[in-house]
Amino acid sequence: MTIPVREHFATTTRGLNRQSVPMKLFEKAKKYGIWNPSDIDFSKDKADWQALGKDEQDILLRLTAQFQAGEEAVTLDLLPLIMTIAQEGRIEEEMFLTTFLWEEAKHTDFFNRFFVEVTGTTGDLSHYHLDNYKSVFHQALPNALNRLRVDQSPEAQVIASVTYNMIVEGVLAETGYHAYYTVLRDNNLMPGTTHGIDKLKQDESRHIAYGIYLISRLVAENPDLWDVAEETMNTLLMPAVGVVTESFDCYDPIPFGLSVDDFTNYAMMQFQKRFARIEQSRGASLDIVDQLTHDAIDADDA
């Protein structure tokens, strides 16, 4: 392995580009990302939990077990992406990416606290991880991110970011938040958990914004990579939607009056929205990619 020699530092030659997309996201992370799961009051959540029916508890355990393992997975698998960006000398992007690992670890902490402090669950919950879930989190995600350990090509970066930022975060996590809000906020349940989900969603919105930017930048720089991005998106769409449907198939009737169509439609909407954003980068200049991302960030309060 050849160890590169550092010839210069960006901060003492050109300086930091504070108007860049990643630095704008870094500023938002410094402002909105400082929250502590240990500060959340779960006392009412515990009382609400104890008043739920068996299937109502079970579907919340299922949803949270999927989130818990997903957050652990990205915490474990994220480093190769950070290292790849660092090796390219993209200091502004790496500065923002340092917040990813911190936030994913914090999300892992949050869901563990929900299990321990709200539900009292400490046993093995892996039976909630069904076939489609395993195909995404046991196979596609670690394979795509860990490929970057040996292959830092733009193609490998596109596959990694599509898998992590677009599918795992942009489709599955977003649909999961919709489930939490439909169950908890709409029924005035578990305010502490709902507050934590608000904070998680805020964090993940920055991750998704960066991921769409990264994929779009790579496609703009390498137009042939659109086919790679499109193929990866389409390949992972079915197992992602399958995670949703296989979860609801376990219940008859579905607790809380939930509708599987509502959530599959929501997942497809998230997919199509991100697909359209990335497709705009085909044949676009980097200036256009930057402007599109700035506009999307400005439209998001956090």
Image: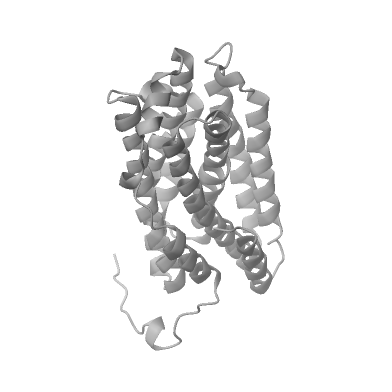
Q: Front-most of 106 and 273? A: 106
| Image quarter of the C terminus | bottom right
Q: Which residue is drawn at 50% across and 56% down?
A: 157
Identify whether 95 is placed above or below 39: below
Residue 65: image location, x then y, percent? 40, 30
Left or right relative to 72: residue 137: right
Q: In which quadrant of the rendered view does residue 268 lie?
A: top right
Q: Residue at x 46, y 59 (%)?
A: 32
Q: Which residue lies furthest to the top in this view?
A: 252
Residue 66: image location, x then y, percent? 44, 31
Q: Work out whether residue 265 can be spotted.
A: yes
Q: In which quadrant of the rendered view does residue 61 lie?
A: top left
Identify whether 49 is placed above or below 197: above
Left or right relative to 17: residue 36: left
Q: Which residue is drawn at 69% across and 44% down?
A: 272
Residue 13: image location, x then y, percent? 41, 88
